[in-house]
Image: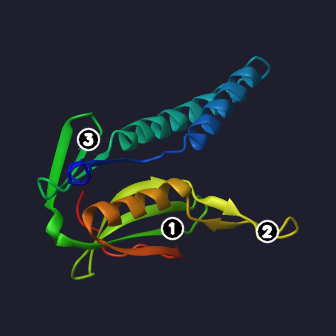
């Protein structure tokens, strides 16, 4: 009986956002302020970087408020997020719409490890969470390559086991396809 109760507990998913770009922009703003003591052009640079850093921070805070709850008891996937002005929004999908779960690395300058639910028809995916990819190197003398984040792997496996979905595993580097609306 306790095993069945454990399977009915909802799985709550949250992004792991990196604030590195925000810290860099705000650091450049401080650097510009320090330069402003010597030259007025430094104040212009400080204002530009402070504005850019503030926009990045706002974007990260809004993205960090996104939550996905997978509730097997209710048969629902609930996406809770906020708008740019922090107005709450929610979207609900039936759990029976999905047949599998997968993880992959979205390549680019800032690569990210995505975990997604895939519809039974296979045509669309629903983003569950974003993680920083783990950088693995086969040996000390080789370049690191992007690998699956351990938290993403645990999440993918937990979802597959608890919800009875097919685990498509880690797919490596690939571009994302059609996405369900958030």
- Which label belongs to residue 143? 2
Question: At 21% across and 49% down in the image, what residue appears?
Answer: 5
- Which label belongs to residue 106? 1
Spot occupied by residue 85 in the image (x, y as percentages of width and height): 27, 34
User: Furthest residue to the top?
Assistant: 37
Secondary element type, mark 3: loop
For label 3, the residue is: 83
Q: Quadrant of residue 101?
A: bottom left
Cα–Cα span, label 3 and label 2: 40 Å
Q: Quadrant of residue 125?
A: bottom left
Cα–Cα span, label 3 and label 1: 24 Å
Question: At 58% across and 29% down in the image, what residue appears?
Answer: 47
How many residues crowd around disc 3 within 10 Å: few (fewer than 14), some, or many (20 or more)?
A: few
Q: Earlier in the sequence, mark 1 or mark 2?
A: 1
- Above/below status of 34 relative to 3: above
Question: At 77% across and 71% down in the image, what residue appears?
Answer: 138
User: Furthest residue to the front?
Assistant: 1
The residue nearer to you, when weighing 43 against 9, is 9
Query: Which numbered mark, 1 or 2, is in the foreground of this view?
Result: 2
- Which label belongs to residue 120? none
Q: Earlier in the sequence, mark 3 or mark 2?
A: 3
């Amino acid at each position: 009986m306790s095993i069945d109760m454990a399977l009915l507990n909802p799985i709550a998913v949250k992004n792991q956002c990196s604030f590195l770009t925000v810290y860099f922009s705000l650091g450049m703003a401080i650097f510009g302020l320090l330069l402003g003591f010597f030259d007025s052009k430094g104040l212009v640079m400080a204002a530009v970087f402070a504005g850019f850093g503030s926009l990045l921070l706002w974007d990260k805070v809004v993205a960090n408020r996104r939550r996905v709850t997978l509730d097997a008891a209710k048969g629902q996937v609930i996406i809770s997020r906020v708008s740019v002005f922090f107005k709450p929004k929610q979207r609900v999908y039936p759990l029976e719409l999905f047949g599998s779960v997968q993880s992959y690395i979205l390549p680019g300058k800032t690569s990210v490890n995505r975990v997604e639910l895939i519809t039974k028809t296979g045509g669309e995916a629903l983003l569950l969470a974003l993680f920083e990819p783990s950088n693995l190197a086969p040996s000390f003398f080789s370049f690191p390559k992007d690998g699956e984040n351990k938290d993403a792997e645990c999440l993918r496996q937990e979802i597959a086991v608890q919800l009875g979905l097919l685990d498509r595993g880690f797919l490596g580097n690939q571009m994302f396809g059609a996405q369900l609306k958030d």
